[in-house]
Amino acid sequence: MNNYFELKISINPEIEEIVSDIFFSNFDCEGVVLAEEAYKDLEMTSTTRGTLKVFLTSFPQNLKEILDTEREFLKSNGLTDNELGSWEITLDEKENQDWSKKWKEKWTVTHVTDRIAVVPSWLEYTPKGNEITIILDPGCAFGTGTHQTTQLCMKAIEKYLKKGDKMADIGTGSGILAILAKKFGADSVYGCDNDETVIDVCIENAKINNVEADFELKTADLLTEKYDFVCANILHNVLADIMGDLKNLLKPNGKLALSGILDEKKPVVLEAIEKHNLKIIDTLYQDQWTGFVVEIK
């Protein structure tokens, strides 16, 4: 059996899913561990929060060049060096001891709300009462259900999506939001992304969850359909740039859930909401992240 490489990278915990997706998109990445915490007598004694552990099947060629390019892209979209973290890296080659399963040991069921649970695909889980479960392979693409920004959108779906709605997820990542909307009773769901590597992942996740969903490589400005409910979990600057396109997707009484917004970046999104004559009907908070649910005035 071939050896594997364990990479550790220092990041701001708030962007751990974004950095995870960079590794899955650019390298031979089998899995990631976002954070590991140890407890004794109900008190946390240690944590790896702030260090992303990445499991790679081969030595990453052009590692520094690719990460530098991706970091500059994120900075061009409004993130600062402080918000990104240092991205200091250690890389160790390790003996293969069924390592492809090792990264899965720290994953468990994520209870987003009393009604929503995200279950790693290799675990068996029996839903409680009217609980809705999403079966997912964590780390396969942005949107594993563990990050606050994804959960804010999931809570908005639970609260505002109506049975029979036509729903769209812009920047769909793993497809988790579209899949959840279908399970909550949406008549049809659609997801698009500008990253071609995630589309096959979305299709597979829909199959695993036994739902019908359409996914394609496309951006919001190219869509002509109208929807009852739209989700966009994207960086704050991108949300601001495409707010007009998102508005154009809404039916007259449609709802738009916006997430991916650090508290300190709210003014950027609020300005775009006002500029495009949208009205905030709800504001959702989780840790240092904010989500908005808006509609046309």
Image (tube, rainbow, N blue to C red):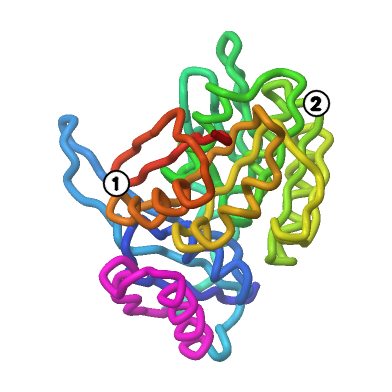
Position above or below: 208 against 125: below
Q: Earlier in the sequence, mark 2 or mark 1?
A: 2
> Which residue position is annotated with label 1?
288
Q: Residues within 10 Å of mark 2 (few under 14, many from 20)?
A: some
Instruction: Judge by depth and name the residue closer to the eye, 164 or 205.
Output: 164
Circle 1 crowding by C-alpha within 10 Å: few under 14, some 14–19, many from 20: few
The label on residue 228 is: none
Q: Is residue 48 left or right of residue 112?
A: left
Q: Secondary structure at mark 1?
A: loop
Query: Residue at coordinates 38% horizontally, 57% vertically from top-left?
Result: 268
Q: Residue 179 at what x, y percent from top left? A: 70, 36
- Residue beneath the point at 56% across and 13% down: 128
Q: Residue 134 location in percent, x, y?
A: 64, 32
Q: Is residue 106 visible?
A: no
- Secondary structure beneath disc 2? loop
Depth order, front residue of 173/43:
173
- Name the residue that disc number 2 marks: 187
**How far across and how far down the image is residue 28, in percent?**
63, 73
Residue at the top extreme? 129
Q: Examine the rendered structure and indicate whether residue 54 appears above or below residue 124.
A: below
In front here: 240 or 111? 240
Residue visible at 55% across and 74% down?
4
In what quadrant of the picture does the C terminus appear?
A: top right
The correct choice, above or below, for 193 with respect to 86 in the image is above
Amino acid marked by disc 1? Gln
Please say whether residue 26 is one of the residues in the magenta stretch: no
Range of the magenta residues? 63-91
Instruction: Decide if residue 152 is on the left or right side of residue 3.
Output: left
Quarter of the rendering occupied by the N terminus: bottom right
Residue 115, how many percent across, how many down? Answer: 53, 19
Q: Which amino acid, mark 2?
A: Asp
